[in-house]
Image (spheres, rainbow, N blue to C red):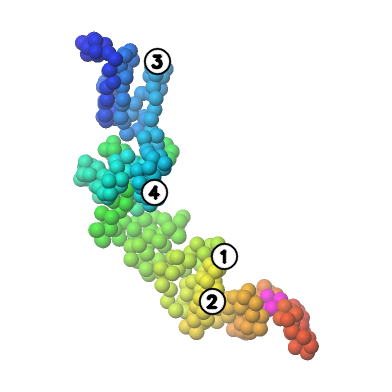
Amino acid sequence: AALRHDLNLHAPLTLLLDDAETLNNDGRRFFTNLLQLSGIRWIVASTTPEDFPIRTLRLRNVPTQLITDRELALSTDEMRDLGLTEAQMDLTQGWPAAVSLAALGDDPRLVAQELLLTVPDTLIPSLRRASLLKTWRTLDPLNTALNLTEGWLATALSYGVPCTRLDNDSWAPHPIVREELRLQLRDRPSQYASAQRAIAGALQAQQPMAAVEAYLASGEETEARALLERMLPTLRSAEQLSAALPLLQRAAPAPGSPLHVAFAQALFEGGSLVRGLSMAEEALGAGADPASTHALIGQFRYRTGNYELAAQHLQAAITCSTQAPHHALLAQLGLVYAQHAQQLTGEAARAFAQKADEAAY
């Protein structure tokens, strides 16, 4: 009562309450009553909206305005007016403290470094490992794989680690904070490799591409190649092969291996026609399966308009095959002969037309 009397005595007032999430239930009830005093405007800072009884206040007709971190962030125009580059704007994402440092010519990561000094030392190792995740979730199998401490996310939020809320259980850590934590993890090579291996093991069944990337990041190239090879039957379309191209390149397949052939096909499908064709021929010379590799080179030659060489490789594929020729392969050979015949005249054209008929039957 005495406090309410004094506040009313000095009204109008504007008061600031920080760290509202630290209030216990009694504290919240007491503070909620204070918020209803006329002539007193409160600015309340809290890590999440749930830490503040907004719905209760609105039901009691107390004027309230919720300002999230999105509204507090500086706009692109504001950052541009302060002289930030596009790269700096992408990095800071409007975080006022980071923007201020960037505008002054300082490294905006300093604000992340200072902030992380306020986080308990026992939490930092978990945050470093979590920096390998683009999205932080309370319930995520990767939390267990990475051995993140129980309640790590709630604790991080309570200490003001800046994150953008995506939904009820998902948060995107600020790029500067995530990058700083990731750099700290990379400065500890054994911990970094261990974390990447844990991610790879957890993802290989459902997200094999991401698992291969994690294996490569951990230095486990043998595991990465083995998983890529198991994935080959699923990499059928040009889009799938193009998506796998960076991983195939980083995996450095052994000459003549199935991955070497897949790498050649991915290059060709990705637009590197000459390099893809050259690598396929290199794989053939290094001992790759002759039937499938000749067939692949035949397709490459056909698609680049060299029908004569395409026919030679397709015929070689049929000859080398230990099984009966595949109908699709025979159909392709017939098509190549027919199109080659159209380019020729006279006896040569008739000869290739005859070959096309033979391939068809």
Residue 249 visible to the viewer? yes
Label 4 vs 3, first from the N-terminus: 3
Q: Was residue 336 drawn as part of the magenta stretch in this picture?
A: yes
Residues under labels 4 and 1: Cα distance? 32 Å
Of the numbered discs in the image, which one, if any, rests on residue 60? 3
Which class describes the residues within 10 Å of circle 4: few (<14), some (14-19), or many (20+)? Answer: few
Is residue 230 among what the camera can see? Answer: no
Magenta extent: 332-337
Circle on res. 90 = 4
Residue 84 covered by magenta stretch: no
Q: Mark 4 touching mark 3, by CB under 8 A?
A: no
As drawn, is 342 to the left or to the right of 257?
A: right
Is 98 placed above or below 193 here? above
Q: Which residue is mark 2?
A: 274
For the residues labelled 1 and 2, say whether their Cβ atoms are less than 8 Å apart: no
Badge 1 local density, few (<14 within 10 Å), some, or many (20+)? some
Question: Disc 3 and disc 1: Cα gap in Å?
Answer: 61 Å
Label 3 sits on a secondary structure element that is loop
Secondary structure found at label 4: helix
Front-most of residues 70 and 301: 70
Q: Are marks 3 and 1 in contact (CB under 8 Å)?
A: no
The nearer-to-camera label among 3 and 2 is 2
- Between disc 3 and disc 1, whose residue precedes? 3
Secondary element under disc 2, as helix, strand or loop, is: helix
**Among the 4 quarters of the image, the one containing residue 50:** top left
